[in-house]
Amino acid sequence: MSLKEKLAEKIEQQRLRTAKLLKEYGDVKVDEVTISQVVGGMRGIKSMVTDISYLDPEEGIRFRGYTIPEVLEKLPKMPGAEMPYVEGQFYLLLTGEIPTEEDVQELAEELKKRKALPEYVKDMLRAMPRDTHPMTLFAAGIVAMQRESKFAEYYEAGHFNKNTAWEPTLEDALDLMAKLPVLGAYIYRMKYRGDTFIPSNPDLDLGGDFANMMGIPKPYDDVARMYFILHADHESGNVSAHTAHLVASALSDVYYSYSAAMGGLAGPLHGLANQEVLKWIQELMKNKSGGKVPTKDELKKFVEETLASGQVIPGYGHAVLRKTDPRYMAQREFALNHLKDDPIFAVVSMLFEVVPPILSSLGKVKNPWPNVDAQSGVIQWHYGVVEYDFYTVLFGIGRALGVLANLVWDRALGYAIERPKSVTTDMLEEWAGIH
Ligand code: FAM
């Protein structure tokens, strides 16, 4: 069964579930909302629905019900690879099923046909000042390709219909997913490697071809596969996923939606933490331990100094998670195999011992354990991707897997345009009994 046929079958079943909930149980209460949630970024309010991933505070992310160790174990791998095909993760997120090797090959072939980056995108990128931030180039490249949108064409032609709108959206999602690694690598080589574009190799899988276009030898292909799979999705309420969903709810196509999402991912509170970790460790090694791996006591002192100066320890803590992020553990396992002699990884490992007891002793930190970002920048640095600014682009390529799967389902289930209600401060004061 092709991916499209499989999706059509799943969508039909899911529509019945959603229709029943709406028709028979539409008045059932899901949550209550407090003033601190309304003022405080809507934190924790249950007000969105997605089946692509769910973040359990104790277990971490589950992709379509599977934990990270399960995903890494169950998804098909190519012979000789340590990490599964990225295409397999996309198939899982789209359909909810672990693909067979044949399913993966079919999707990989589909993506290969679609990966050519239009020449006008390259021309546009080259016309922009070379010191433009790579995320700006990335978002601009995505929105520039909006003219390719099959959904926009279908809508313009007056074909819009709630039953079929997911089909051109799937076409757009496949097109964009195929092109993002090419766009990312193009930006990297243009900006940081003297404008030496490496063409895509049509025989390679998504992760393998990304490593090829970046110009980085093995095992960077596995690093790319791991990075994209682990960053694929983190529920729908985070800034990038939510932005894409919101923009798409106006029936904007995936190009408009995903480029807007990248504006959110570029923000310091969202996509930048991995570079903060690296900067912080390198500052420690430069200023405190003469360029060498510090002793445990030196490290403890540095952690305490950072806290005393009012800064947070980057890479530690999480808004929802309450244990070590399984994405950290998966990357740590890889690093234990491949980065054993890397001095920065030695510090990362030592921090894993030193930081949690110190943060716990503060008594206010809800999660003293490391998050995904405590590890990912270090691995990129090890393989020569030393340009911090580029790390968010990598995140943006990976995050598309989940966000684009969500956008296909948004259309399939006919989710409404988002329009939460805002209130005034006077009203809050009145409800609080202040007036
Ligand atoms: N170091 C020092 N203090 C910390 C801390 C850390 N790593 N994590 C939390 N705290 C403090 C926090 O600042 C707050 O203090 P105040 O009450 O004085 O303001 C207190 O502990 C309670 O915070 P919380 O409820 O445990 O965490 P939040 O939900 O408010 O914030 C984070 C979550 C991720 C923003 C926070 O843990 C943090 O700033 N961590 C360091 C930066 C980081 O690693 N960000 C990446 C997050 C990553 F998962 C991602 O989204 N990419």
Image (cartoon, rainbow, N blue to C red):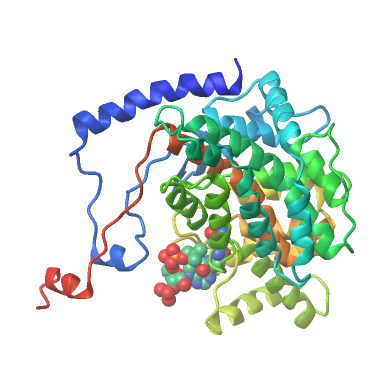
Question: Which residue is at the far bottom?
Answer: 309
Q: Viewer-proximal residue, 45 or 345? A: 45
Left or right of 337 on screen, residue 411 = left
Q: Hey, which quadrant is residue 126 in on the image?
A: bottom right
Establish if 244 lies above or below 351: above
Location of the C terminus (image quadrant): bottom left
Query: Is residue 345 something that shows in the picture?
Result: no
- Residue at the outermost front position: 157
Left or right? Give the position of 393 relative to 12.
Answer: right
Measuring 54% from the left and 55% from the top, which residue is drawn there?
261
Tally the marks: 0
Q: Residue at x 48, y 60 (%)?
A: 367
What residue is shown at x 90% (from left), y 57% (from top)? 196
**5 or 395: which is nearer to us?**
5
Residue 85 image point, x, y percent: 71, 33
Q: Position of residue 430 (x, y in %)?
A: 12, 72
Query: In this orientation, which residue lies closer to the viewer: 355 or 164?
Result: 164
Split into 4 quadrants, where in the image is the N terminus?
Answer: top right
Q: Is residue 116 above or below residue 283?
A: above
* Residue 102 location, quadrant: top right
Q: Is residue 241 left or right of residue 222?
A: left
Tell me, yes or no, if residue 283 can be seen here.
Answer: yes
Q: Nearer the viewer, residue 282 or 22?
A: 22
Across and down, in percent, residue 130 comes to 78, 70
The residue depicted at 37 percent of the width and 39 percent of the height is 415
**Residue 358, percent across and down?**
54, 70
Quarter location, residue 76: top right
